[in-house]
Each structure stands twice: as structure tokens, then as C-alpha cells.
Amino acid sequence: MFIGERPGDQEDKAGKPFIGPAGQLLDLCMKEAGIDRDAAYVTNAVKHFKWEPRGKRRLHKKPSLGEIRACHPWLDAEIEAVHPRLIVCLGATAAQALLGPAFHVSQDRGKTIGIPGYPPIVATVHPSSILRAGSDEDREKQKQQFVDDLTVAARGISAKI
């Protein structure tokens, strides 16, 4: 099970998670890590798209702690219904939704974490952060780190944690 932050503009319009540029990068990196996207359940911690207008574009706004908490019952219901063997949190919002507001992806990314009531969790960056990297070199380095994190998840899935 892969959990992102909240729907983006394209996801909000289509009603499906991770179909925009970040989703395309996620697909590519999952494949490189040996994870079948069709076998994975993909969702978001926050279920609505909060945005502000910028010209003709709708730019996302980070969900508040209250919004994360308000959507938590739906996320828990999805986890209960799906029964994932492992959860991959994509970005700080998703990770903090399950691991608490003190969790920092930058410090504990790519590690398997166990908390009561949930399957093992691996937290990593959100693929959109890779797309925002300043240079091609930085983007490629961050992409490889992301694939490395997803490889940890793939090993956990295949080991039937």
C-alpha cells in the first residue's frame, strides 16, 4: 500500500491518485525497484484537494494537522480493508499521518518501522519533491535514493514481513 499526501490538481479532476507527473515518476521508480504498480493499492492520507489560484493554475496547499486528523478514519478504514503486508508513506504528510507529527522523513527514510496496529511502514520522499530538484544532476541523485527506498519496500514485501 502506497500513501501520498493529498490529491494534486490532475488527481482531483480525475478522481484517481498519482496520475500526474509525480505519479508517472512513481510508476517508473516502482518498476525499477521491482514493484508491480498494478498489485499495489495507492491512496492519499488527506482525501481532498486544498488549493489556491495562481493565474489559471490551481496550486496545492499543504494539509493542516486538523485536516490530516479529520481524514485519518478513512485512511484506517482503507488499511483495514486492504490488509497490506507493508505500507510505503510518500512524503512527510503521509508519514506523519501514521507515525506522528515528530517523524522526519529526512532522518528515517528507507527504514522499516514497526508500530502497533499497522503492518511494517517504510517512509520516503514524495516523488513531486524529486521533480522540483534544481538540476538534472540533483534530480537523478534524488531519483536513485527514492528507488533505493522503494527497493527496501520491495524486499520487505517479498520477504512476507
Image: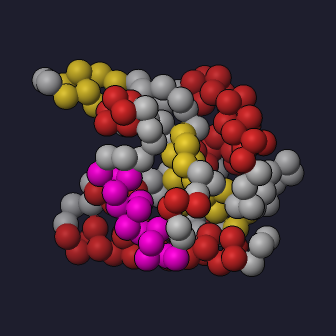
Which corner quadrant of the image does residue 159 belong to? bottom right
Name the image quarter holding residue 61.
top left
Q: Is residue 76 above or below residue 92?
A: above
- The C terminus lies in quadrant: bottom right
Residue at the spot 77% in from the left edge and 73% down from the top edge: 160
Q: Is residue 123 visible?
A: no
Decide whether residue 60 is among the magenta residues: no
Q: Position of residue 85 (x, y in %)?
A: 74, 61
- In the picture, the quarter occupied by the N terminus is bottom right
- Location of residue 155 with respect to 75 vertically, above or below: below
Extent of the magenta region: 21-34
Between 66 and 71, the one lying in front of the other is: 71
What type of secondary structure mainly makes up the magenta span? Answer: helix
Tell whether 112 sits left or right of 6.
right
Direction from residue 103 to residue 85 in the image, left or right: right
At horizontal 72% and vertical 47% (from top left) the residue drawn is: 82
Instruction: Pick out the residue farthest to the left.
Output: 55
Residue lying furthest front in this view? 38
Q: Nearer the viewer, residue 89 or 38?
A: 38
Left or right: 13 in relation to 38 = left
Where residue 67 appears, as percent x and y from the top left, is 57, 24
Report the front residue among 87 and 35: 35
State the residue lying farthest toward the right.
116
Using the image, determine if residue 160 lies above or below residue 9: below
Above or below residue 28? Residue 47 is: above
Is residue 25 shown in magenta?
A: yes
Q: Residue at x 49, y 30 (%)?
A: 63
- The reply to whether residue 18 is in sight is yes
Instruction: Please give the name of the residue rendered at 29% of the width and 73% of the height, measured from the top-left corner.
Output: 140
